Image: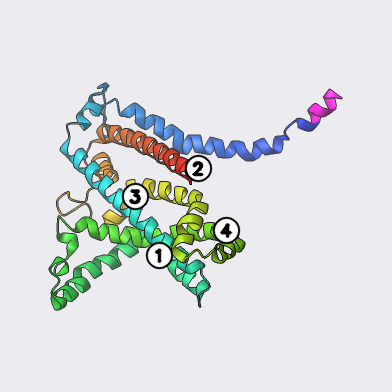
Amino acid sequence: MSAVRGRHNRTHPTFYWMVVPAVVLFFVLHTLPLLQGVFYSFTNYAGYGEWEFVGINNYLALFRDDRVLDAYLFTFQFAVVATILTNAIALAIAVGLNANIKLRNTLRGVFFLPNVLPMLVVGYVFSYLFASVLPVLGQNFGIEAISSNILGNESLAWVGIVVVAVWQAAAFNIILYLAGLQTIPTEVYEAASIDGAGPWRRFWTMTFPLISPFFTINMVLALKNFLMVFDHIVALTNGGPGNATTSISLLIYRGGFQGGEFAYQTANAVVYLVVIVVLSMFQLRFLQRREVAA
């Protein structure tokens, strides 16, 4: 009897053949390069030629490098602002698109369109708007802040990057929030209406708590993606003016592949990987506890 039960419980080899190739590919294409990068972070390898072990000197030098500290400051400022704006705007639009309005399906397609557009194309289009269209409007209406190209202004260039990043990232978040809103039974809203709850009260006491898991995943993914911002900056400012909009990813790319700092920037990448993982785990646990409290 036990032998028969054992045969029934045995996993068919086909499942292993479906899983093992993916695991091998992941290890070869992802884990192995990661381990190789960690190894080189303890050397003085420039990306070519000979190298020697330097211990943790690369890691210690990161804390004395003003370029790294400035890049961290800009990246976190950008990521926090963009994450909050993206989720606030996406949630508001999703609530509107979930209502019984005319052309609802068409509008959903329109709002999702930015997500499928190539970032470089979007970046160059917005570069033209910031450089040519907005200054004309600013001069005609007497708005000093946009009377010149904001991407050439050290104080305002990051605002332009935030605008483009939020505009494109909100599209994906809208889809996730819409999926969450459609899981709420209509009977819940009907019961709340009978109790006399207004739209604002229904949103805060019913809608938002019920879509909390979608809010959590959107916040975690948005912050993680914005912390790794790269192509938005390349398309809009290329890190300028000066180094005002140089993100950590751009600094690692430039120094590692163009500046002969392969080992040093690899150490920077390892530290940043740890920072993102720890921050994402903390954010996930904090938001999940808020879901339980709600």
Instruction: Decide which of tag 4 and tag 3 comes sooner along the chain.
Output: 4
Stretch in magenta:
1-7
- When asked about the image quadrant of residue 282, the answer is top left
What residue type is disc 3 on? Phe
Packing grade of label 2 (10 A; few <14, some 14-19, many >=20) is few
Please name the residue that numbered disc 1 is placed on. 114
Residue lying at 34% horizontally and 53% vertically, measured from the top left: 84
Instruction: Decide which of tag 2 and tag 3 comes sooner along the chain.
Output: 3
Checking the image for residue 226, the label placed there is: 3
Residue 279 image offset from top left, x and y in percent: 37, 38
Residue lying at 49% horizontally and 34% vertically, measured from the top left: 27
The reply to whether the C-beta atoms of the residues labelled 2 and 4 are less than 8 Å apart is no
Packing grade of label 1 (10 A; few <14, some 14-19, many >=20) is some
Instruction: Decide which of tag 4 and tag 1 comes sooner along the chain.
Output: 1
Q: Is residue 236 visible?
A: no
Please name the residue that numbered disc 2 is placed on. 292
What residue type is disc 1 on? Pro
Q: CA distance from mark 1 to mark 2?
A: 34 Å
For marks 1 and 2, give the one nearer the viewer: 2
Please name the residue that numbered disc 4 is placed on. 184
Q: Is residue 279 above or below residue 193?
A: above
What residue type is disc 2 on? Val
Q: Is residue 119 above or below residue 270?
A: below
What residue type is disc 4 on? Ile
Query: In which quadrant of the rendered image does the N terminus lie?
Result: top right
Q: CA distance from mark 3 to mark 1?
A: 16 Å
